[in-house]
Every structure is written in structure tokens, then in C-alpha cells.
Amino acid sequence: MARILHLDMDAFFASVEQHDAPSLRGRPVIIGCDPRGVVSAASYEARTFGVHSAMPVVEARRRCPDGAFLPGNRRRYVEVSRIVMATLATLSPLVEPASIDEAYVDVTGTEMLFGPPQALGRRIKAMIREATGLSCSVGIAPVKFLAKIASDYDKPDGLTVIEPEAVAAFLAELPVGKIPGVGKRGRTALASLGIRVVGDILRYPPDFFERHFGKWGLELVERAHGRGSAEVRADRETKSVSAENTFSADTADRETLLAWLLRQSERVGRELRQEHLRGRTVTLKLKFGDFARSPAAVPWPRPSTATPPSSPRPRPCWPPRTCPGRCG
């Protein structure tokens, strides 16, 4: 039986800022200070005011007027992330970064080296704190999706181990929204069928979910039985490269938007070339004054690292909306 560990840094961006500036410790810290932007991270102190990521900064300031609103320092966050990943690599060669602040680690068969799962989890947490000065939460389970749920179960600074024989009992009363991939719309649709906890899923046959939700419904049944992937890929490739900008004032002028689109394309193309990568699909995302988003994706004729318009490319699929927007 596989043993998969998921590590998730606690309020990562905000915690890095608090670590680097002791005067911020114990204060509400919000990453995002552009009044026309959104919050990218919030410390646990800020979350007590109801501030959370993706919230408009103006709303965050209304809820937490005395918070420390910072622009963020991605270079520093990447630096600390590399320390975290390097620390994990000292325990297992199979480390799969899931994002800048989380990773999966295959720790199958390490009991002889590091002891039982609880001891291993405590060891990793102590190593991360020593290396970075930051806390993290750890989940250990037989498959990846359960390990991810476990790492979020007792945040912050948590450690949750789900043994194989305890999977069914753990899932029985778990809210369906805790399953990765089940968002607000999914929760609402499931609730309309009387399904609120994972155990409710087992009351119906698989074809019931396939009839209502198609392939996703069958995947949900697999999750309810505790089945999922345990493959940890240390060679996980970069999936996307992006660039975005928020204007200081709304604009519907297409020439302005196209000029910014070219500037962002140059940034993306430069990063692709630096990393020796090629792009296959271009996605344009517009954000509007009401924070609604309207993405459009178009395929390239062939994978490329060139910057438009110097290379053949499809005409941008501008979303059919006329209100002033912000190019992202």
C-alpha cells in the first residue's frame, strides 16, 4: 500500500512577509494593495476579518482597515519555495511540486528510516520550520487526493494521518465540498439530490451519478470509495506560463488593450525561451470592472516560443462584452 504525503505551507505569501518583517507578526497581512486588484493571499489574522484570496482589495480594506496591505514579492516567495522543495527532496527522491507552496511526496517504505507516519510528519514539519522559519500542514494517506484533504484538515500547523483501514470512516462524514474539484456549483447540485457528505454518495449506484453528472459523477464515486491516483511524478513539467496587468482605470480602447497584450506576449515568450519551452495554446483573459472574467483560448498552428505578432497566430477571440475591461 502506497503512502503519500501532501505538504501545504500555511498562508505562504503572508507568512513569508511576517517572517522577513517581525513588525508584521501578529498583524493582519494582506498581499494585494492595488485598489483595482484582488487579494492574492491573507494571513490567518486577516482571515478572522473575513478576508480571503480572490477578494477585491477594496472589500478587504473595508473589512480590515487596519491591515497591512503589501504588493508582494514573488522573487522572494520563489526563493523560499525552492528551499521547501529541496528540504523535501532529502527525504524522498519522489517530490512533485503542485504549486509554489505545496507538494506531494511518495514516502512509501520509509518507515525503517523515519519511523511511523506520525513521526515522519513531525520530522518534516520541524525540518521545514528550521529551514524557512515557517509553519506548514501535512497530510499522509494512501492516495494523493486524500493526502491533500488531510493536509487541510487541521490547519494551520496541522498533521493528519489517514491509515488505509480508516479511509471509509474518515470519508463517511466529510462534507462533499472538501473533495478536490467539488466547487460551489457542484455542492449546490449535489445538495439538490440530498447529498451533503461523502457517505451520502454511497447510497446511490454509480449509474445514478453518471446519469446526472456524466464522467465527473463516476469520478466522484471513485473518490467516495477512497480510490485515486498514488503516482507522484518528480519530473512534472511546467503546464503554463502567464503574464497579467491590472489598469489603474477601466478602458474599452482596443488599441490600448492590444498594446498591453503585445507587452504581455513578449514577457511570456521571453520566459518560454529562457526555460526552453514551447506553447501550444494561447489564452486571453479579460477582467471587467465588476471583477467578472471572460477567458478565450485559441490553438497555435504549431508549438512555438515566438512572440506575437512576429509569428503566425490566430486573431484574438475578444469576449462579446462591451463594458470597460481590464486586460489580464
Image: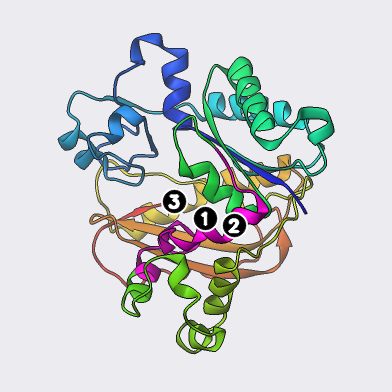
Magenta region = 160-187
Q: Which residue is mark 2?
A: 167
Q: In this view of the protein, which residue sits in the foreground, 228 or 52?
A: 228
Q: Is residue 245 visible?
A: yes
Residue type of the residue flagged with mark 3: Ala
Above or below: residue 271 compared with residue 85:
below
- Colour mapping: rainbow
Q: Quadrant of the N terminus?
A: bottom right
Q: Residue at image x 66%, y 63%?
A: 228
Q: Secondary structure at mark 3?
A: helix
Q: Residue at image x 57%, y 43%?
A: 267
Q: Quadrant of residue 53?
A: top left
* Residue 170 image label: 1
Q: Secondary structure at mark 1?
A: helix
Q: Which residue is mark 3?
A: 259
Distance between the alpha carbons at the discs numbered 3 and 2: 53 Å
Q: Residues within 10 Å of mark 3 (few under 14, many from 20)?
A: few
* Residue 182 image label: none
In the picture, measured across the screen, residue 230 lies left or right of residue 79, that is: right
Distance between the alpha carbons at the discs numbered 1 and 2: 5 Å
Q: Quadrant of residue 249?
A: top left
Q: Secondary structure at mark 2?
A: helix
Number of numbered discs overlaid on the protein picture: 3
Q: Position of residue 281 (x, y in %)?
A: 62, 64
